[in-house]
């Protein structure tokens, strides 16, 4: 696939685009709260406390372990692949009268849908 020049450069510069997004979100948030200029110090301190709290949580309680995440993804993928292989083997070994039911089961396994009724 060939990238267009605009995609590589990003049109507007990315920091400018993100800054404009933050300004727009701030405007709508202030309009929703009905904020007045005298409320600005309290609002900024609340934003600071919230930022510190999110940073603390993301570095302690909500910290992700990439190795554990990869292991879980691989285990889930392996379990799903085994289920599809098992359903495929059942379909191949089954009596032709049961093919429709087994084909629905294979489809459900392949697309991770709930069991067919």
Image (cartoon, rainbow, N blue to C red):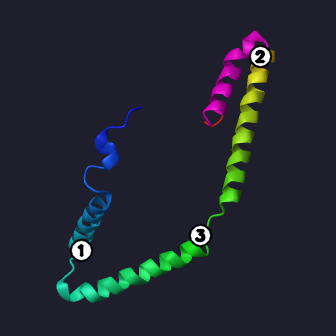
Q: Secondary structure at mark 3?
A: loop
35, 47: nearer the viewer: 47
Q: Are marks 2 and 1 in contact (CB under 8 Å)?
A: no
Q: CA distance from mark 2 to mark 3?
A: 45 Å
Q: Secondary structure at mark 2?
A: helix
User: Which of pointers 2 and 3 lies earlier in the amino acid sequence?
Assistant: 3
Q: Determine the residue positioned at 66% across, 56% down.
A: 69
Callout 1 environment at 10 Å: few (<14), some (14 to 19), or many (20+)? some
Task: Report x, y in % for residue 19.
Answer: 28, 65
Task: Report x, y in % for residue 37.
Answer: 18, 85
Task: Report x, y in % for residue 100.
Answer: 67, 17
User: Which of pointers 2 and 1 lies earlier in the amino acid sequence?
Assistant: 1
Q: Is residue 98 visible?
A: yes
Q: Is residue 38 above or below residue 85?
A: below
* Tag of residue 62: 3
Image quadrant where residue 102 sits? top right
11, 22: nearer the viewer: 11
Q: Is residue 93 left or right of residue 30?
A: right
List the single residue furthest toward the right. Answer: 93
Q: Closer to us: mark 3 or mark 1?
A: 3
| Residue bounds of the magenta highlight | 94-112
The C terminus: image quadrant: top right
Q: Is residue 22 left or right of residue 53?
A: left
Residue 100 sits inside the magenta stretch: yes
The N terminus: image quadrant: top left
The residue indicated by pointer 2 is 92
Q: Determine the residue positioned at 75% across, 19% down.
A: 91
Q: Secondary structure at mark 1?
A: helix
């Amino acid at each position: 696939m060939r990238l267009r020049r605009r995609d590589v450069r990003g049109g507007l510069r990315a920091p400018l685009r993100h800054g404009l997004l933050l300004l727009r979100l701030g405007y709508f948030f202030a309009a929703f709260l009905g904020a007045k200029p005298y409320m600005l110090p309290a609002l900024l301190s609340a934003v600071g406390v919230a930022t510190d709290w999110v940073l603390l949580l993301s570095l302690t309680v909500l910290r992700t372990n990439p190795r554990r995440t990869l292991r879980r993804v691989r285990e889930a993928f392996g379990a799903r692949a085994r289920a599809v292989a098992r359903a495929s083997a059942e379909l191949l070994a089954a009596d032709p009268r049961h093919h429709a039911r087994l084909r629905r089961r294979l489809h459900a396994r392949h697309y991770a849908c709930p069991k067919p009724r």
